[in-house]
Image (tube, rainbow, N blue to C red):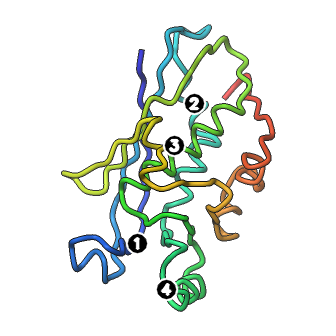
Amino acid sequence: MIIRKMFKFENAHIVRGCSTIKCRSSLHGHSYRVELLFESNFLDNGQMVYDFGLMKQNMKDLVESFDHAITLWSGDDATYLEDMKKHSDRWISLPVSPSAEQFSRVIYLMIDKLLQLVTTLNGEREVKLNSVIVHETQTGYAQCFREDAYSQQMGSIDLKDILFSEPIKEDWHTKTLFDDILESKKFINPKDV
């Protein structure tokens, strides 16, 4: 069984090295839609794969970190990076260029790691992240599966190389959310949401 939860965010970026001149040379934004697809061969006590209400917490915080933010590639020009961080409260720095493909990989890795750290209380079993779909436009999206997220050929992504500005962290329900994920701290799903 596969279930899907969709999130939305507005984000700006430059995708250096791409074929489209406007995209590689000018800051621009998109209205992104992100789909998280989960799978399991089992249903929980509520006859669900995973309660959608549980996704409105830490998973939502991670995905919506990108909302009204600029996403930067840490390998870009140092002066540009410094200026963007200086003039934007909400920024995220990635070790890869912020294309739809890399957004899907980054989000996959964050949600997958979080899911591995969650202790469930309502009979959920063997719930896995099937894929992440990032819609960059109405007609174009990238879909990432496990083998893509962890692919060395597509560029290694280490979660510790993802940086969030302080105003983004302040929006999280748990202010240390990403640090807790990096430190492999356990998360317990609430009994009631």
The vertical placement of 45 against 162, above or below, is: above
Q: Position of residue 130 (x, y in %)?
A: 45, 29
Q: Residue at x 74, y 49 (%)?
A: 182
Q: Are marks 3 and 2 in contact (CB under 8 Å)?
A: no
Work out which residue is located at the far front of the displayed protein and give it: 153
Q: Mark 3 or 2 closer to N-term?
A: 2
Compared across the picture, whether 147 is left or right of 16 comes to right
Q: Mark 4 or 1 closer to N-term?
A: 1
Whole-angstrom CA distance, mark 1 to mark 3, is 23 Å
Secondary element type, mark 2: helix
Compared across the picture, whether 51 is left or right of 170 comes to left
Question: Which label is found at residue 53?
Answer: 2
Secondary element type, mark 3: loop
Nearest to the eye among marks 2 and 4: give it: 4
Q: Position of residue 116 (x, y in %)?
A: 67, 31
Q: Position of residue 143 (x, y in %)?
A: 34, 42
Q: Mark 2 or 4 closer to N-term?
A: 2
The vertical placement of 56 against 173, above or below, is: above
Q: Residue at x 71, y 21 (%)?
A: 120
Where does label 4 land, which residue?
Answer: 77
Q: Are marks 4 and 1 in contact (CB under 8 Å)?
A: no
Q: Mark 4 or 3 closer to N-term?
A: 4
Q: Residue at x 48, y 63 (%)?
A: 96
Three-letter amino acid code at the position of disc 3? Tyr
Three-letter amino acid code at the position of disc 4? Asp
Where does label 3 land, which residue?
Answer: 150
Displayed quadrant of residue 12: bottom left
Where does label 1 land, which residue?
Answer: 13
